[in-house]
Every structure is written in structure tokens, then in C-alpha cells.
């Protein structure tokens, strides 16, 4: 029985010797064949790059492409919430932008997202709510814009960059 939770780890998040299709099949292993095929179709619609390369082995994908595959695999069972651990880690700025665009597209489907991310500015730009952890404890929490524009938080934890503007994608946050 599915708990409605998806998880994408920071590292080792795909089965490199397997193709994109085989990775997605693993994500949907609990589904019957018709539901699994329908889920793959949804993933190929959400991630067109994966559709183009469906028979390519995961090992031949770039880090950003593997990250997209890992997200698609986690979404195969239509979770209500998905945890993304450092989705931009080790990616070029261009690939990180692509991953964050897809995170926004996932959120637009109604899936709640918990994003653990060290690229604070990008994360705040697409989030509704944020938590600042200091030595493993929540030091500050609030709306993402509120956190980004708080001078004491910005100077102590976020660096000198300007806060994101008022136009942001909205990620669905689980109730506090």
C-alpha cells in the first residue's frame, strides 16, 4: 500500500545501468501494467526530454537529466507529497535552472513539495514557505518572501544577494 510519499535523494538517485523506461518501471513496480503505462505517459508529458531518450541508459545522462529521471520515477505512483534532497547539487547553473523549472511544474500538478536546498535564493524564489535551520533546529520560519526580505536573516544566513521579487511560482506546502 502506498503512503503517498515520494523521495528523491541527492546522490545515487537512478539505476545507471538501466534505461529511462526501466527506471520508471521500477518507480511504478506496485502498479498493474495498464496503470504503469499510463503513469509513464504522464511522466513523458511532464518531462519531454525523457520521452525523447526513453531507451537511453541512465548512465549516459547528464547529472541534471538524471535528476529529472529521479523525480519522474518518484512521481510514478502519484504521491501527494515529494521530498527533494538538494536537487541542484553539483549541477551547472543552466541545468539547475532546468531542474527548478521542473520543480515548479510538479508543484503545479498539485503535489506538495518539501525542498531541502542549499541554493537558498533559487529555493526561496519558487517556494511559498521557508524554514531556516541552525544546528539542526528551526531558527526562523515564515513565508518565503518574508524570510528572503528579512535583513537580519539575509545578513546572517543568506548572504548579501537581493531578495527575490514578488513574482514567484508557488509550491504547495503541507499544513504546519
Image: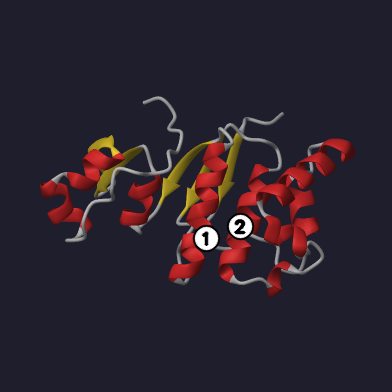
Rendered position, 120 above or below 136: below
Tell which tag, 2 or 1, sits nearer the viewer: 1
Q: Position of residue 110 (x, y in %)?
A: 56, 32
Examine the image and state in which quarter residue 51 appears.
bottom right
Determine which residue is flagged by label 2: 68
Relative side of 170 to 15, left or right: left
* Residue 31 image offset from top left, x and y in percent: 81, 37
Q: Quarter-wise, where is residue 23 in the image?
A: bottom right
- Residue 134 horizontal side relative to residue 120, left or right: left
Identify the residue shown where x is 41% and y is 49%.
116
Picture coordinates of residue 128 (x, y %)? 36, 37
Q: Is residue 157 left or right of residue 61?
A: left
Given residues 18 and 21, the one toward you in this image is 21
Task: Indicate which disc, 2 or 1, sits on the residue closer to the N terminus.
Answer: 2
Query: Which disc is residue 33 wearing?
Result: none
Q: In the image, 86: left or right of 27?
A: left
User: Are the residues flagged by discs 2 and 1 in contact, CB closer than 8 Å?
Assistant: yes
Residue shown at the point (38%, 42%) measured from the top left: 127
Give the label on residue 98, or none: 1
Q: How is the image coloured?
A: secondary structure
Residue with the most extreme bottom position: 60
| Residue 52 found in image quarter | bottom right
Provide the secondary structure element on which disc 1 rests.
helix
Observer-nearest of 12 and 157: 157
| 10 Å crowding of disc 1: few (<14), some (14-19), many (20+) | some
Q: Quadrant of the C terminus?
A: top left
Q: Where, quadrant-wise, is the N terminus in this rendering?
A: top right
Residue drawn at x 43%, y 38% is 170
Work out how far the residue at label 2 is from the one at label 1, CA to CA, in angstroms.
9 Å
Amino acid at each position: 500500500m502506498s503512503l503517498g510519499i515520494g523521495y528523491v535523494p541527492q546522490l545515487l538517485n537512478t539505476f545507471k545501468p538501466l534505461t529511462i523506461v526501466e527506471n520508471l518501471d521500477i518507480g511504478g513496480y506496485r502498479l498493474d501494467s495498464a496503470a504503469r503505462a499510463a503513469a509513464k505517459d504522464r511522466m513523458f508529458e511532464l518531462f519531454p526530454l525523457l520521452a525523447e531518450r526513453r531507451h537511453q541508459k541512465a548512465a549516459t545522462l547528464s547529472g541534471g537529466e538524471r535528476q529529472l529521471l529521479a523525480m519522474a520515477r518518484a512521481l510514478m505512483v502519484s504521491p501527494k507529497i515529494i521530498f527533494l534532497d538538494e536537487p541542484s547539487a553539483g549541477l551547472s547553473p543552466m541545468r539547475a535552472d532546468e531542474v527548478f523549472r521542473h520543480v515548479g511544474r510538479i508543484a503545479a500538478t498539485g503535489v506538495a513539495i518539501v525542498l531541502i536546498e542549499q541554493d537558498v535564493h533559487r529555493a526561496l524564489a519558487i517556494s511559498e514557505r521557508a524554514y531556516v535551520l541552525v544546528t539542526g533546529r528551526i531558527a526562523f520560519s515564515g513565508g518565503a518572501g518574508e524570510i528572503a526580505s528579512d535583513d537580519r536573516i539575509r545578513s546572517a544566513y543568506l548572504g548579501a544577494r537581493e531578495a527575490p521579487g514578488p513574482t514567484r511560482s508557488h509550491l504547495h506546502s503541507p499544513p504546519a
